[in-house]
Image (tube, rainbow, N blue to C red):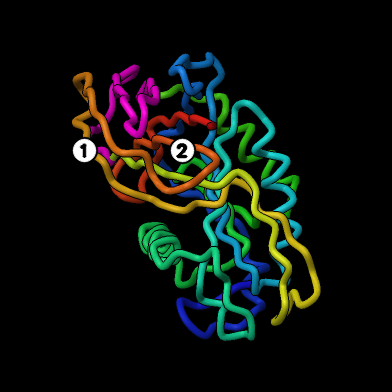
Amino acid sequence: MAVGLKGLTMKNNRMKARAWRGFALGAAFASVAGTAQADRSVVVELYTSQGCSSCPAADKILKSLKQQGNIIALSLNVDYWDYLGWKDDLALAGNSKRQRNYAKIMRSRHVYTPQLMIDGKMDVVGSRRSQVDSAIATYSRTEDEAQIDARVSGDTILFSVTPSAQTNGNAVIWLVGFDDTVIKNIGGGENHGRSIEYSNVVREWREVGRWDGKSSLNLQSRKPKGEGGFAIIVQEGEVGPILGATQVSY
């Protein structure tokens, strides 16, 4: 369903996908031991809600996407549908804020669910499989601008960011913790009576550094919340094009 930052009608979920021009990038995955795979990857952020009747189809698509080795798939539950009769207990206020920041930079008048942001550059309706696959195919063919290697040592994450192409710099480094699978039985609202499976549910989205895009950078941070693993995302600005990413599963 769609919403104008607050109070728009549900018709907006039919809105057409918009593209935002920018550099298209991929990323490399890392294992717990920190060995990166060669596949380029695409970061997809699904803005979803337990209170959105249009979202379960998109949630299923995200589940299938996370099984593909070249995709970092993340569920970001939002809280602005809670007034419809069911509180989304997976929602983070920061998820809604991040989505609104994307809307501002893309000059969109509203946010909606299920919205799928792809590599920080383009959004599509997350339940439209053909659009999703087409957009992912486009960005999976592009080069990374940042190479990330990560490993876990106890409760600490050690990682490095290295330029692999010329960048504009001024990048934000995000550490994102997630749960692998969460199943919710919905007791009210539009999805009353349904059991919905959520994949790679974001539990924490935290800035851990800034990068100039020119020199290699070594950092460490405490592990984020989330039992499934984490992703490290290097992004041009807070909601700009994604320059590179890696994922570690526990």
Of marks 1 and 2, the one in the foreground: 2
The numbered dot on residue 210 is 1
- Image quadrant occupied by the N terminus: bottom right
Drawn side of residue 166 relative to residue 120, left or right: left
The answer to whether residue 201 is magenta is no
Q: Label 2, on which residue?
A: 230
Above or below, comparing residue 240 to residue 83 in the picture: above
The answer to whether residue 162 is magenta is yes
Residue shown at 46% from the left, 33% from the top = 24
Q: Of the residues shown, which amino acid type is indicated by label 2?
A: Phe
Mark 1 element type: strand
The range drawn in magenta is 145-172
Drawn side of residue 236 relative to residue 121, left or right: left
Mark 2 element type: strand
Q: Residue furthest front?
A: 154
Above or below, comparing residue 229 to residue 206 in the picture: above
Q: Of the residues shown, which amino acid type is indicated by label 1?
A: Arg
Residue shown at 26% from the left, 38% from the top = 171
